[in-house]
Image (cartoon, rainbow, N blue to C red):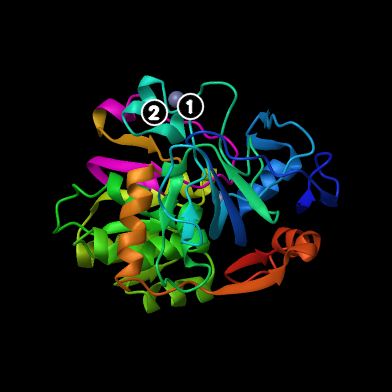
């Protein structure tokens, strides 16, 4: 199969002809129609995540095939698998675990640490190829006649947004919720929010165009992330019991945690990186909770696809490019020159 493979961290992807793995018992093979390009692909391509003082290295075998936002058609099923039938349009849930440990059994396979790692497009070959081998056929989620690309995006940015919103779903409905950072994932959360939360949403971003976009998706206010701007909206709408940080930078963390009311929840999703200090006594005294949210569960991915199939959520901006232009797409994404999401088509 044709693939754009990573042969070394930081080096341009290389066009390669790789052997697609045959699906064994319980497995499947999917013909990829679209693979979304995500900021995480850039971090994996760099070879590390920024943990502030330290760089957390990425461990993968080369050649690696990136691309974890995968949409396609079922091409082959392994022994014992009868559904979804061959030809079915599917999104592929990529955050696979071992399917055997306690974490996986409770449905949190995205948190599995068993070796070898199985996440598609991260530890195993992903969607930047003609075919993707799927180790567990239950990762295939039929998408019906969903608009092209939506199923792919739902598997990472959409799922990340959805799962983060679910983590604050118990916020009392009369309190506004603060969403910080209206990039791709933040805007998808904005678009999904009224299907998940009854609360008013206040958006914060440093860029006027992104604040404008948030208002278009139904934010009651869109502010600059400054204490003064927050004070003004909190006087009008009340203080917030929950915030989601889609940036994950020291500046957004400082702004957002200060905005919380006592007992509030702070969910960090963004992987911008860096480090921060925190007066420890503020945790028991205020007392706030700081929670990380990493992608989402398979059942959440299925619920999100159901929601999208009902047409409840506006589609984010998407652009398609041929897979052999993966390198220029990566460069454009790095340079901040991409509006919306790039989908590579093999
Ligand atoms: Zn991603
Ligand atoms: Zn596991």
Q: In the structure shown, which secondary structural element does the residue marked by tag 2 occupy?
A: helix
Q: Relative to 253, is 325 on the left or the right?
A: right
Q: Which residue is mark 2?
A: 104
Q: In the structure shown, which secondary structural element does the residue marked by tag 1 occupy?
A: loop
The quadrant where ligand 2 appears is top left
Which of the 4 quarters of the picture holds residue 101? top left
Magenta run includes residue 268: yes
Disc 2 residue crowd, few under 14, some 14–19, many 20+, Cα 10 Å: some
Task: Write the start and end of the magenta stretch as one range.
Answer: 256-284
How many numbered marks appear? 2
Disc 1 residue crowd, few under 14, some 14–19, many 20+, Cα 10 Å: many
Q: In the image, is residue 163 above or below residue 87?
A: above
Q: Is mark 2 within 8 Å of ligand 2?
A: yes
Q: Is mark 1 within 8 Å of ligand 2?
A: yes
Residue 2 coordinates in the image, percent (x, y): 78, 55
The answer to whether residue 106 of the structure is visible from this angle is: yes
Q: Nearer the viewer, residue 171 or 146?
A: 146
Q: Quadrant of the C terminus?
A: bottom right
User: Which residue is at a point 41% across and 72% down the rendered structure image?
Assistant: 145
The answer to whether residue 35 of the structure is visible from this angle is: no
User: Which residue is at a point 23% across and 50% down the rendered structure image?
Assistant: 169
Q: Are marks 1 and 2 in contact (CB under 8 Å)?
A: yes
Q: Which residue is mark 1?
A: 98
Q: In the image, is residue 24 above or below residue 219?
A: above
Magenta run includes residue 341: no
Q: Nearer the viewer, residue 70 or 163?
A: 70
Between discs 1 and 2, the one toward the N terminus: 1
């Amino acid at each position: 199969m044709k693939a754009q493979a990573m042969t070394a961290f930081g080096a341009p992807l290389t066009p390669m002809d790789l052997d697609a793995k045959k699906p064994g018992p319980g497995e499947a093979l999917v013909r990829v129609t679209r693979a979304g390009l995500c900021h995480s692909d850039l971090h994996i391509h760099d070879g590390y995540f920024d943990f502030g003082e330290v760089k957390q290295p990425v461990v993968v075998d080369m050649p690696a095939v990136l691309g974890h936002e995968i949409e396609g058609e079922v091409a082959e099923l392994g022994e014992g698998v009868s559904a979804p039938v061959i030809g079915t349009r599917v999104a592929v849930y990529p955050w696979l675990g071992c399917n055997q440990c306690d974490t996986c059994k409770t449905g949190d396979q995205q948190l599995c640490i068993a070796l070898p790692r199985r996440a598609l497009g991260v530890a195993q070959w992903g969607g930047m190829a003609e075919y993707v081998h799927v180790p567990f056929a239950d990762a295939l989620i039929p998408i019906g006649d969903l608009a092209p690309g939506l199923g792919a995006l739902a598997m990472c940015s959409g799922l990340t947004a959805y799962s983060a919103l679910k983590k604050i779903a118990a916020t009392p409905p009369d309190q506004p919720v603060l969403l910080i950072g209206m990039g791709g994932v933040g805007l998808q959360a904005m678009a999904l929010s009224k299907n998940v939360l009854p609360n008013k949403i206040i958006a914060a971003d440093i860029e006027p165009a992104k604040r404008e976009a948030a208002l278009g998706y139904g934010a009651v206010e869109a502010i600059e992330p400054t204490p003064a701007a927050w004070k003004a909206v909190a006087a009008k709408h009340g203080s917030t019991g929950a915030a989601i940080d889609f940036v994950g930078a020291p500046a957004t963390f400082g702004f957002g945690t200060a905005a919380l009311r006592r007992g509030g929840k702070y969910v960090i999703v963004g992987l911008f990186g860096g480090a921060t200090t925190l007066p420890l006594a503020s945790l028991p005294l205020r007392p706030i909770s700081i929670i990380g949210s990493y992608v989402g569960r398979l059942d959440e991915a299925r619920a999100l696809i159901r929601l999208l199939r009902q047409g409840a959520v506006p589609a984010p901006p998407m652009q398609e490019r041929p897979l052999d232009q993966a390198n220029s797409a990566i460069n454009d994404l790095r340079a901040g020159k991409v509006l919306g999401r790039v989908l590579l088509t093999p």
